[in-house]
Image (spheres, grey):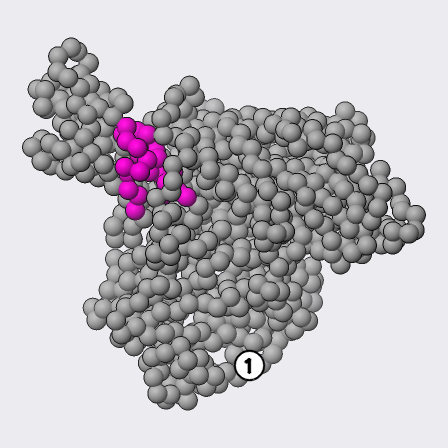
Amino acid sequence: MSEGNGTGREFRVVGTRPIRHDGIDKVTGRARYGADIHLPGMLQGKVLRSPHAHARIVSIDVSEAAALAGVKAIVTGADLPEVRSSEEQSGESVTNARDLSANVLARDKVLYHGHAVAAVAATSAAVAEEALEKIRVEYEGLPPVLSVLDAMRDEAPILHPHLRTRGGEKSDRPTNVASVTVFERGDLEKGFAEAAEIVERTFDTAMVHQGYIEPHNAVAQVNPDGQATVWCSTQGSFEVRKLCAQILEMPLSRLRVVPAEIGGGFGGKTTIYLEPLAVMLAARSGHPVKLVMSRSDVLRATGPTSGSHIRMKMGATKGGRICAVDAWLAYEAGAFPGSPVMMGAMCLMGPFDVDHLRIRAYDVVVNRPKTAAYRAPGATNAAFASETVADELARRLGIDPFEFRLKNAAQEGTATAAGPKLRRVGCVELVEAARACAHAKAPLERTDGPRRRGRGFATGFWFNAGLQSSAVISLHPDGTASLVTGSPDIGGTRTSCAMIAAEELGLAALEVRPVVADTDSIGYTDVTGGSRVTMATGLAVYEAAQDVKRQLCERAARTWKVEPDQVRFEDGRVVPLTSGPEPLPLASLAKASAKTGGPIVGRATVNAQRANGPSFAGLLVDVEVDTETGRVDVTRCTVFQDAGRAIHPAYVEGQMQGGSAQGIGWALNEEYVYDEAGRLLNDGFLDYRMPVTLDLPMIEPVIIEVPNPGHPYGVRGVGEASIVPPPAAVANAIADATGVRMTTLPMSPPRVLAALREAGWRPSSSPQPSVA
Amino acid sequence: MATVFIPAALRRLTGGADRASARGTTVRELVDDLAARFPELRAALVRDGELPPHLAVSVDDVIASAGLDESVGETSEVHFVPPLGGG
């Protein structure tokens, strides 16, 4: 791997804003998404889902459905291989094959409303739907458990009789607590003894969905020899291949996964739901089969992120140093173990340097859909707690919130909660930039009327991920190039990777054509997640470009009959180190490649763990709180993020704005609403309220660039950190406006109004409590 | 000698110690050395010859891609941490 982080280097392409390679296809509707794929003889698939949150499956009778004209195949859980329980590191998370299989199709129990029970392939969607109605499933109802606190009670209904707590006291009692993780260092008692102020609060956050526009889909074709191809909307084609092969017990070489264009993922498309069903139905019917989820399917039965319950105690000295933190976090995993609670625990105090801390983290199964990754998974819940408590401590101590954060800011050498120390990071620079920005300096016009104004700030931390990537660059005879990677593009990474290739080879960004290839056409590449693609796949591209340059130098040396070490590549051409021949431009060498040894193709594979660099984000918001209705409007918003190096600043800004918008939706409106029986009540976008353009002001992005020392350009991932601060920033702004500390998400009008009433706020004609 | 930091949940196996010095040129050798003193540690840190799936290891503050086979230096600091994910 090449060293250096680009400090002092003058870039020609990096840092510019070329038009996106996929832009025309996207805006003209030509881009082909999974649902656009049609194959000759293709059948339509539909999935029967559980109407219950928790029930035993007594029997499934598909005979009547199978007899329906046009029905070509039906599968139930009994048709899936019985895979053994085996946990495996899978891309960026741990997956248990048995749980995954039981989530794809329920076996003896259904564990949430919408859990898949059977799938049908038929000649039309209408016939498939009719067939679903003819499948007879006899259920024996079981009591559901929907919240972590209920699930942790001794007498709670048990989801998995075999489950025992990993990391806890040894016990043979069945439990819903899948794991306990504790991070602890220093001396809590000593730390709290130093405190001039201690704030202790309890927080609750709701389960929320990523809300990607494009529903999950899959098309599968299985040849008579068993070779299968799957087209789907995914953030990780290799992950889909691996997981499908695992639960269908297929060799990897018999399954090709083609990533279609993707209409949003945000972490939710890093696992499988429909893909194995499509393969099974295609194999049974002998026809290609397509399945596309409805919005209701997506909300009920894919992977939202955890609701959580967090207890937070933090102390600070009179001088404003955080001296001790004691936190307790319990996250809903959904129906199977695997919430992001450990990551929440590790990010909880990410922006702060704390000597004495204890963080206990509980992963708890409940009768809700199995959670999946969602943009900085776990960190937003945690930051809602830590950043509002930090803000409250600052105010109690009479210290400006920016100053308080600077006094405690994480920096190089700061130990993370799990122990490893940070390398060079940009937390200090970020808070300083926020403090100095025009928004922070602008006076906030406060009023005495029913609409109160406030300003809040919060920061957030995200690790980012390294993992494995591959890249291939082929030079064309005219001096342009193609770039093949295996990273589905959910955030502009095609263009950023092409820009890295262009930067290295002396080309224009649009002279490099980026292609996202299927699993048979590029080397293994981990998921598009963990904000890793521009950093890690970009690193593979950088190394592939070095390979191209080495070959160009060899070709030029051969032409000049000198040793390769007598030439070098610079500014898009090979130049001799000694006087003599004229430099050879890349285009000339590419044109002559047939005569000098054949096509010039550079390749690289990387495990980018060492190159990874974490990122910090901050959000400054102004809000207006209607004290008569509880409605909160965000009226001004500035987001800050340390990008390390912004390859394509417009894309970085887009990520920052997108993360902020999602975080504000999480803060103010979004939540899964269940009835007492565990049925999801708001399984559509009319009732699951995500923010739209009219709900938000312009989100002003401010990019901070503190180079990542592990990366040749200094790149850090940028896709996730910006979703971490918004709920805390909004809560801090509400507190600034009204003096009321919100501790439950979403801070929807009924909750805000109830909190205001509890604090003594009355209709506008009455005297109001002091805000201070 | 390298310093191995003991995760809080495993400190009951080390008599409460939050860190221990260990000899070795790889993480695996450090674990072997520690297991000679704290035998129950091995089962917690090694499964089927590798790290359990719910653990990763960092050597000198960088997540080690080679897991137990990662090289360590004389003064390396080794932490066992949860694997990181993302969205």
Q: Residue at x 29, y 53 (%)?
A: A518
What residue would you read off at disc 1?
A: A139
Q: Position of residue A221 (x, y in %)?
A: 28, 67
* Image quadrant containing the N terminus of chain A: top left
* Chain of the residue that carries numbered disc 1 in the rendered image: A
Instruction: Tell me which residue sits at (49%, 58%) in the image.
Output: A213
Q: Nearer the viewer, residue A410 or A546?
A: A546
Q: Is residue A239 above or below residue B66?
A: below
Hey, what amino acid is under mark 1?
Answer: Tyr
Q: Residue at x 55, y 45 (%)?
A: A659
Callout 1: SS: strand
- Lateral position of residue A746 relative to residue B72, left or right: right
**Left or right, A157 with reference to A212:** right
Residue A341 picture location, percent across and down: 59, 49
Magenta-highlighted residues: A492-515
Judge from the rendering whether residue A475 lies leftward or rightward of residue A184; answer left or right. left
